[in-house]
Structure formats: structure tokens, C-alpha cells
Image (cartoon, rainbow, N blue to C red):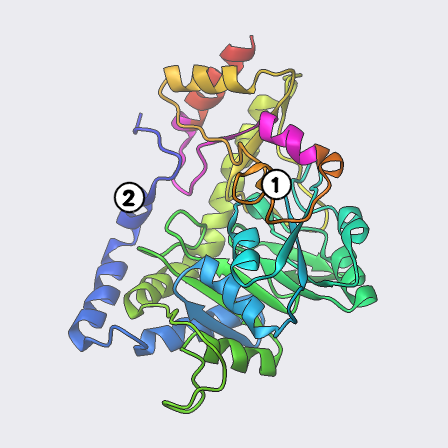
Amino acid sequence: MRPLSMVDLKSQHLKIKNELDAAMAEVMETTAFIKGPQVAKFEADLATYLGCKYVTGCANGTDALQIALMALNLPKGSEIITPDFTFVATAEVVRLLGFTPVIVDVDADTFNILPSSIEEAITENTKAIIPVHLFGQCADMDAIMAIAKKHNLFVIEDTAQAIGADCFYQGKKVKAGTVGHIGCTSFFPSKNLGCAGDGGAMFTNDEELHKQIHSIANHGMGKHYHYDYIGVNSRLDTLQAAVLGVKLPHLDEYNAARRNAADKYDTAFAGIASLQTPKRATNSTHIFHQYTLKVLDGRRDGLGDYLNNNKIPNKVYYPVAVHESRAYKTACRFEESRLLNTINLCKEVISLPMHTELDDEQIEFITTTVKQYFN
């Protein structure tokens, strides 16, 4: 059996090595390392894939969120609603820009932001919502957009873990990240669409927002050396765009391979009373950036130890809620009594290896070992 890993980037790389080598060699030959033609081509190809009008690449997914917020020109004192159960980047960029993250709860089964929690948290200072499409499937965008319209709020979709997922919005199938005012993603190597370093992108159908995003990512420049906005320096390197250009045509194949592995996990774990396999929401396809189990009856840490003893990689995403982190306890607005789902999830969740190269032998070993623990 091949060695197990949470993410097998090497095996994925070897399958497309010739394409990647040729794409990177072309960049090295032309030496157009910044804003080379591969960047514009990848942006255009990603826009076509997503079915949206505009894509702007940037240096990483966190920058994408920050630039998106900057482009909204929100007033001082603005509050931005974000989920409690997520990677910290969403709350981080809100605080860095001087706004207040308002932390709300998530659904206990899908792990995505609860629309009812959003509604409860809105005040006159609320200006935007950042739903995170966690672990590979979309939040309830019908409900979220209805709330946003009712209260005149912006919506920035964090699509870092769900790039390529289908979202069923108002009876139509669209791509994750294209429903709100701005979508953001990360191309961190372990993502479903990952580059060979850091990278990110923002997408929108709004021409004015696109112009601001594009300018802000390049020091706020309009015409060369004419600065229309306070900006940052956040560009998608040409080498990374070349890598992504090779991988993008494989994205649906990669996502299908992850779903296939998840199906086999689901089948193997059916009937184990202490395990809850990932719920697949009706409003979205699931592309399984992570395969995350809920372990009930206080047995999560015991399972993790057992897997470690059997040399099976596993990880807890996330062991600490945003509102419980030292840096954010006093930097956010929240009501802990309304965050009970998140508090419980931090004690229950565990993720198993999930990537495009999982084979039947590996899955059989992982699932057999999990079942042995519960038996």
C-alpha cells in the first residue's frame, strides 16, 4: 500500500508533470514573472468556468477577502457577520481593516453559517455577510441573499474550500462564489484547485466592483502611476497562473475523485452509532475539500489517538472556535449562548485523508481501522 497522507500532492503532480513542466518552462523562458500573459489567460479561463464576468488573481486567499472588503468602501464602525466555525482568515481581515467581526453559529450538520443566526445578529451597523462554504459545499445562499436584500447588506462568499461546487440558487445551478456581490478563493496547494505556492482570486459580475478590486490589488492604480484608491500589492505570480492553467481543466475530474472516495467512506461507516458522516445539503453539490466526521459520545480524541497509533493521518478542523481564540475574545461581537453548535463541533469533528489520489486499498485500510476502534 502506498503511504497515507492527508493530501497527496506528489502523486497528483506526477500525473500532469509533463504539462506542468512545459507551462513553467515557458514562463522561465519569457521571464515575464509578474503579469505575464498566463495570468490574464487563467483569469479569463476561470471566469468562463465559473460563469461569471470578471476574475482578478491575487497573492493568496486571505488577501482576496481583504481586497474584497476594501472594494466595498464601508464606513467606519461597520460590523461584518462571519461564522464561528471556520478558519480565522474571515474574521482576521475584518479586524485588520478596523471593522468589527460579528461571530454567529453554524448548522450542526452541514457546518455552514446558519441563516437564522445571521438574522439575529443584524444591527444598524451591519454592512456585510461573509458566508464560508466550508469543507466543500455551499451555505444556504437563497436564505442568505434574501436576508442581505432585506437589510441592504453586501455578501462576500468565501469559496476557498468549495471551488467548483455547484450551488442551486433560485432554482438554477450556478458555481459556488458567483451568487454574492464578490466571491473569493484560495489556491493554497492543498485546495481542490491548488497552485505550487500561494495564490488567490476574486470574482464578480459587477463591473464597478471589478474595477476597484483590480485597482486595489495593484496599489490602487488606475492609469500607470495614477492612484485612484488606497491599495495593496497582491498579485498572482505568472508561474502560479501557469500551474493553475494546467490544473483548471482537471478540476471537475479532481472533484469527482473526491466524491467517489467520500461515497466509499460513507458506505463503510453506515450503521456506526457514534459516527455521523458528512451531511450533503440539497442546495449544493459537495466536493469534499475535507471529509469530516462527527464523533459522538466523547470518543473523538480516542479515535484520533487510535488512528495515530495505526499511522493514519487525521486532523481536527477546527479545535478552537474563532470566538474562543485569545486574539478574538475581545475583538469580536458575539453571544456565546448562541454559539452552541460550534462549541460542540469543536469537540466532535475529525477529518480523514481526502485527496484525488486515494485508492481502494488505502480507503479499505482507513475504514477498517476506524471500524475496529468502534468495535
Q: Quadrant of residue 307?
A: top left
- Left/right placement of residue 23 relative to residue 40 reads left
Q: Residue at x 50, y 59 (%)?
A: 185
Q: Position of residue 74 (x, y in %)?
A: 64, 71
Q: How far apart are marks 2 and 1 (CA)?
A: 36 Å
**Circle 1 Cα neighbour tier, 10 Å, few/some/many (<14 / 14–19 / ≥20):** many
Residue furthest to the front in view is: 330
**Circle 2 Cα neighbour tier, 10 Å, few/some/many (<14 / 14–19 / ≥20):** few
228 in relation to 213, above or below: below
Q: Is residue 164 visible?
A: no
Q: Is residue 5 magenta-colored? A: no
Give, as a single range, the part of the protein colored magenta: 341-362
Q: Please state which of residues 14 and 153 is positioned toward the viewer in this rendering.
A: 153
The label shown at residue 160 is none
Which mark is in front, 2 or 1? 1
Q: Please state which of residues 65 and 79 is positioned toward the viewer in this rendering.
A: 79
Q: In which quarter of the image is residue 40?
A: bottom left
Q: Which residue is drawn at 60% across and 68% down?
A: 182
Q: Which residue is drawn at 51% across and 47% down?
A: 256
Name the residue tied to disc 1: 323
Quarter in which the N terminus is drawn: top left
Q: Position of residue 281 (x, y in %)?
A: 70, 44
The amino acid type, in three-letter code, at marker 2 is Lys
Q: Please state which of residues 318 and 145 is positioned toward the viewer in this rendering.
A: 318
Name the residue tied to disc 2: 10
Q: Which residue is drawn at 33% across and 44% down?
A: 9
The amino acid type, in three-letter code, at marker 1 is His
**Element marked by disc 2:** helix
Residue furthest to the left in view is: 29
Q: Which of marks 2 and 1 is nearer the N terminus?
A: 2
Q: Where is residue 333 in the image (x, y as percent from the top left)?
A: 68, 48
